[in-house]
Image (tube, helix red, strand yellow):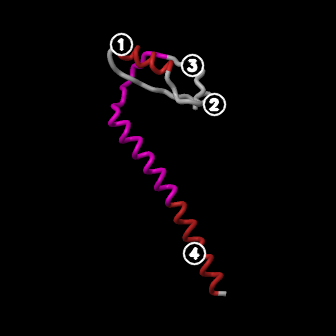
Amino acid sequence: MVDGEQHLIVRVEGVEEKISRFAEFVESNYAPGASVESIEVKDYEGEVMSIDSFRQSFMVSLLAKIIDTWEGMLKKWDDWIAETQKVLKT
């Protein structure tokens, strides 16, 4: 989110010609149903993460979310079992 709006930021690295072709492709090809108000191309002075590093980082963050979700589900399951056992004992 940037200023309360959803944004997608893509950082690419390469020779000027390939970056220009990529920008042209992006301007005319986006997901069906996507709402694209504008596309900006700017110079970026930082380091661009390799796709392999990005993929690894992304997968780790997804796995962390899955683990958090499963922990919550297991806690609820344990609570349900405890409550069921209480009811069965009465």
Residue 49 within the segment the image draws in magenta = yes
Instruction: Determine the CA span between mark 2 and mark 4.
Output: 42 Å
Mark 1 belongs to which amino acid? Glu
38 or 29, which is in the foreground?
A: 29
Between 87 and 43, the residue placed more toward the observer is: 87
Please provide the residue range marked out in magenta: 41-70
Magenta: predominant secondary structure element?
A: helix
| Mark 3 vs mark 1, CA separation in Å | 21 Å
**Are circles 4 and 1 on residues that touch, CB within 8 Å?**
no
**Left or right: 76 in relation to 13:** right
Looking at the rendered structure, which numbered label has been put on residue 38? Answer: 3
Q: Nearer the viewer, mark 2 or mark 4?
A: 4
Spot occupied by residue 3 in the image (x, y as percentages of width and height): 62, 27
| Residue 56 percent across, percent down from the top left | 36, 41
- Estimate the x, y position of residue 40 in percent, counting from the top left: 51, 17
Image-based side of 50 in relation to 61, left or right = left
Q: Above or below — where is 41 with respect to 48? A: above
Q: Is mark 3 on a helix, strand or loop?
A: loop
Say the numbered circle drawn on residue 81: 4
Would you name the residue on which mark 1 appears? 16
Residue 17 lies in quadrant: top left
Three-letter amino acid code at disc 4?
Answer: Ile
Which disc, if any, is residue 4?
2
